[in-house]
Image (cartoon, helix red, strand yellow):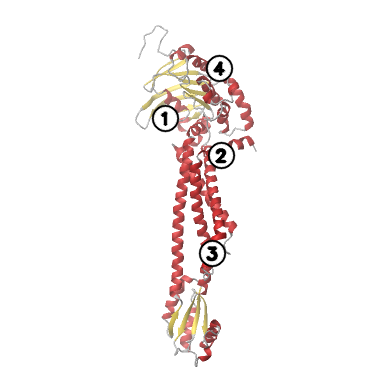
């Protein structure tokens, strides 16, 4: 290791970095905002994925049979879903068992002893592999003979599915916009440094420094800005996780949200990587533009 | 060392800077390029260190075909030659020592080589005692010495000087030209573009005269003005 060379190189990077501190701070701030957004999006998405999965797993299609359904019709319905690749399981629930389950579920809130006869129809309980297929499976069940009614909480499923999609789109859109803004600001910051150092760059080119060598300090400057922005963002996210998140959980007790699925170390490393990558990319582009002329 | 064959240079704005120029300069030569401003002296030098690319013709510098040189190979060419300008092009926030060392550092020299080569070169140009000063604290002549040291520190075989004495008084001019002579005697090929008549007339070296982008005369021991001192009539 040639320490003289290392010292010279680091000196150049640091001098660049501190030369326009104001612009540098703006760049770091923008990166931080971008990464806070990205981080909270990833965090909430992971937490929601657990929640969504949990809720959707509970969704089953209940096929209520007509009171006068024949045994052959019942078998036909069962067979129709047994062979369906979208279907995970088909269970026949005779009305007696249905009543037992109802009793268990209501835990004495409804006094079933008052019932003189069982009001429940026989039914099939169908579990579907992919929640997206629930509406289609329900529709095909309605076509079958002997089926009285099909219930699966249509609104609930559809809303959950579309809410997820909307959130994803809005979140990704906002992140994309901020990524672009952050890149532009870093790129401009580097361009200012490049401009301030144009004489040095000209001399470097004159004495035969390679473009790679000329580029390096600027790339490091950009990477440093990106990483500092990411670190700041991780700090902000850390504080938010410690203060806001518990309150959110309190405010929404009915939502089984959980951050258990989030690996904080992995998320932090991912965010650092994103910050560094924005910095490197933005500075690469803005120096490249200068060197080509 | 240098060979130009049918070289033309047309700038994008349509100006014909050089028009079918052919020129041979041998190893260890000392050559003046003279002519009025805008006759193509600087353009010719710029072609040699590949700051510009010829529109037509072949250029060879130290065995490298400069006209066909890929962009990625330009740094390698420039490490074989040094360039000195009228305005010195020193970095004002670096000391003389740092300015000279910069040329080595940015081309990846080891710090051992830098420590060995920089003092030696500063000694050659006579600036060893001012190596810790900044360019702003030096006279014009001293700044040009520092610039020459920077051009020489990587031991180039060729030194290109574009109006090296343009900003200097007569005393400093003489000193710089003497320094260039000394460097030339050590075997470095030197090409000086100038319109300083006194310098050219006193040195009596090879003089290549450009007019409107063409070489009009090429004399072995020439004067600034064609035929001066030989009893001939001034032409052009």
The secondary structure type at the circle numbered 3 is helix
Of tags 2 and 1, which is closer to the observer? 2
Query: Real-space Cα distance between discs 3 and 4?
Result: 82 Å
- Position of residue B230 in the picture relative to residue A273 (left or right): left
Q: Is residue A104 visible?
A: yes
Give the percent coordinates (x, y) of residue B80: 54, 28
Tell me residue B115's x, y (percent). 63, 28
| Residue tagged 1 | B54
Q: Nearer the viewer, mark 3 or mark 4?
A: 3
Secondary structure under the numbered disc 1 in the rendered image: loop
Callout 3: chain: A
Labelled disc at residue B182? 4
**Labels 2 and 4 within one chain:** no
Chain letter of mark 4 equals B
The chain identifier of the residue carrying mark 1 reads: B
Can you tell which of label 2 and label 4 is closer to the viewer? 2
Q: Measured from the top left, where is residue B146 in percent x and y?
A: 54, 24
**Viewer-side residue, A139 vs A59:** A59
Task: Rate crowding at label 3 as few (under 14), some (14 to 19) or many (20 or more) other CA atoms within 10 Å.
Answer: few
Which mark is nearer the camera, 3 or 1? 3
- Label annotation for residue A247: 3
| Residue underneath mark 2 | A14
As drawn, the label of residue A213 is none
For the residues labelled 3 and 2, the Cα–Cα distance comes to: 42 Å
Q: Nearer the viewer, mark 3 or mark 2?
A: 3
Q: CA distance from mark 2 to mark 1?
A: 39 Å
Q: Residue at x 42, y 80 (%)?
A: A142
Tag 4: Cα neighbours inside 10 Å, few (<14), some, or many (≥20)? some
């Amino acid at each position: 290791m040639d320490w003289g060379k290392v010292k010279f190189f680091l000196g150049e990077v640091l001098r660049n970095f501190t030369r326009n501190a104001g612009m540098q701070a703006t760049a770091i701030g923008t990166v931080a905002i971008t990464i806070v957004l990205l981080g909270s999006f990833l965090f909430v998405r992971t937490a929601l994925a657990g929640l969504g999965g949990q809720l959707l797993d509970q969704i089953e299609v209940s096929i209520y049979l007509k009171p006068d359904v024949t045994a052959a019709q019942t078998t036909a319905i069962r067979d129709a879903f047994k062979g369906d690749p979208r279907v995970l399981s088909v269970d026949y629930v005779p009305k007696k068992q249905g009543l037992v389950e109802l009793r268990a579920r209501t835990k004495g809130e409804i006094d079933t002893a008052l019932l003189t006869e069982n009001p429940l129809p026989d039914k099939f309980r169908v579990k579907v592999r992919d929640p997206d297929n629930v509406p289609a499976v329900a529709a095909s069940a309605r076509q079958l003979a002997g089926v009285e009614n099909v219930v699966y909480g249509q609104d609930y499923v559809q809303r959950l599915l579309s809410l997820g999609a909307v959130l994803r789109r809005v979140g990704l859109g906002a992140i994309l916009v901020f990524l672009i803004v952050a890149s532009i600001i870093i790129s401009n910051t580097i361009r200012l440094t490049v401009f301030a150092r144009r004489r040095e760059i000209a001399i470097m080119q004159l004495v035969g420094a390679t473009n790679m060598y000329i580029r390096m300090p600027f790339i490091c400057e950009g990477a440093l800005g990106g990483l500092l922005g990411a670190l700041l963002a991780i700090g902000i996210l850390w504080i938010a996780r410690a203060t806001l998140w518990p309150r959110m959980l309190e405010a929404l007790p009915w939502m089984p949200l959980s951050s258990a699925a989030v690996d904080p170390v992995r998320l932090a490393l991912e965010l650092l990587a994103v910050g560094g990558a924005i910095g490197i990319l933005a500075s690469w582009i803005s120096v490249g533009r200068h060197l080509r002329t | 060392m240098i060979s130009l064959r049918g070289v033309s240079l047309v700038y994008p704005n349509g100006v014909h800077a050089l028009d079918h120029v052919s020129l041979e300069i041998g190893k260890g030569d000392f050559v003046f390029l003279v002519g009025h401003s805008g006759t193509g002296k600087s353009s010719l030098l710029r072609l040699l260190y590949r700051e510009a690319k010829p529109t037509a013709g072949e250029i060879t510098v130290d065995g490298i075909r400069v006209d066909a040189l890929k962009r990625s190979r330009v740094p390698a060419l420039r490490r074989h030659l040094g360039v000195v300008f009228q305005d010195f092009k020193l970095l004002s926030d670096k000391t003389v020592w740092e300015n000279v060392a910069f040329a080595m550092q940015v081309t990846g020299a080891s710090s051992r080589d830098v420590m060995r080569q920089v003092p030696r070169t500063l000694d050659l140009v006579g600036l060893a005692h001012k190596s810790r000063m900044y360019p702003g604290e030096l006279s014009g002549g001293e700044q040009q010495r520092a610039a020459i040291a920077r051009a020489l520190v990587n031991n180039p075989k060729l030194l290109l000087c574009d109006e090296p004495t343009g900003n200097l008084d007569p005393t400093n001019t003489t000193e710089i030209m003497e320094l260039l002579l000394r460097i030339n005697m050590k075997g470095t090929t030197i090409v000086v573009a100038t319109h300083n008549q006194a310098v050219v007339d006193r040195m009596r070296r090879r003089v290549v005269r450009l007019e409107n982008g063409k070489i009009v005369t090429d004399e072995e021991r020439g004067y600034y003005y064609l035929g001066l001192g030989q009893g001939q009539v001034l032409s052009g």
